[in-house]
Amino acid sequence: MSIIYEPTGKAREYSPLAANLYSGCGHKCKYCYVPNVIKLEKKIFDNQTTERNSIIENLRKDAKKLKGTNKQVLMSFTTDPYNPFNNIAKLTRKALEIFLENQIPVAILTKGGMRAIQDLDVIKKFGEHIKIGASLIYDNDIDSKRVESGAALPNERLEMLKVFFKNHIKTWVSFEPIIQPKQTLNLLKQCLEYVDEFQFGKLADDKRSFDWNNFVNTIINILRNKNKEFYIKETLRKAAYKVQLQPKEIDVDYLTLKPFEQIKETLF
Ligand code: SF4
């Protein structure tokens, strides 16, 4: 069974490769699309996180085949690498060690907040070949507890980013799904100084009347002024169809990490 796979559709906009270590999550986000995609009852997905069968053994086999690849692997799409159960199973740490051994660049995306700090020592060993991101949806505890009851609170996610940034690890934020654009803007302003890259996407089935052109113009002006890298996902581009974006701002691979070998070649 392949653990490292090529995502398709909207997921491909995040990474050329991905790996999911767990079945279920525990962050209990009400907007989570995963139970529908993997055909698992939402109640089970939310409350019974388990290790996937022979996960580490299969991951090791896949990683060996990909050794030195120029494609980054994202953890994760159908679970969160720092879901509460990872504190016990610690699969994310084992996976990171395997990726490092096989020189595979890794992008992490989590709502686990400070839980991710437990792997700081391994993460630092990747140097420029890793980035750690937080998904930010709400800017306040009330909304976050109501909609993402098992995830770290917004301030804790921001705190996590600060810690990694201070430790010279590349940081990024996924603003997807954008549910309250004012809150997205507020969060963006709060984390600008310690986040390197940003990605924005809206709910595909969001039919609310809203001036997305104005919103996207506002965020890209902020980001361009600060020389920050960003990617606007297709769902949002379609809604903000009047906004002129540069080729790199709509290039799915522009923000992917460089392979280990390529960086060596540029050094010598
Ligand atoms: S953190 Fe991600 S995978 Fe987990 S419940 Fe929330 S949206 Fe779903």
Image (spheres, helix red, strand yellow):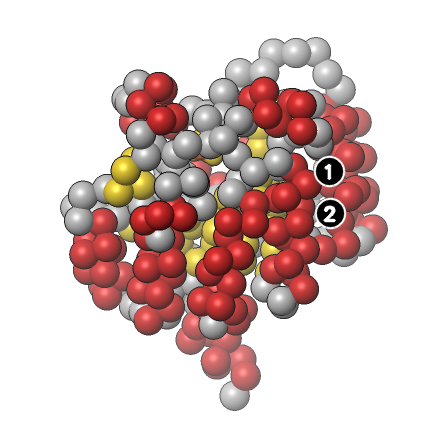
Q: Position of residue 47 (x, y in %)?
A: 36, 26
Discs 2, 1 touching: Cβ within 8 Å: yes
Q: Amino acid at mark 2?
A: Cys
Q: Is residue 258 above or below residue 197?
A: below
Residue 187, numbered circle: 1
Q: Residue at x 22, y 49 (%)?
A: 55
Q: Is residue 256 left or right of residue 25?
A: right
Q: Quadrant of residue 66?
A: bottom left
SS for tag 2? helix
Q: Residues within 10 Å of mark 2 (few under 14, many from 20)?
A: some
Q: Residue at x 70, y 29 (%)?
A: 140
Q: Is residue 50 above or below residue 87?
A: above
Residue marked by disc 2: 191
Q: Amino acid at mark 1?
A: Leu
SS for tag 1? helix
Q: Is residue 229 visible?
A: no
Q: Position of residue 13 (x, y in %)?
A: 49, 41
Q: Residues within 10 Å of mark 1 (few under 14, many from 20)?
A: many
Q: Position of residue 120 (x, y in %)?
A: 51, 63
Q: Position of residue 6 (x, y in %)?
A: 33, 45
Q: Is residue 115 above or below residue 80?
A: below
Q: In this view, which residue lies farthest toward the bottom?
A: 268
Q: CA distance from mark 2 to mark 1?
A: 6 Å
Q: Residue at x 33, y 58 (%)?
A: 95
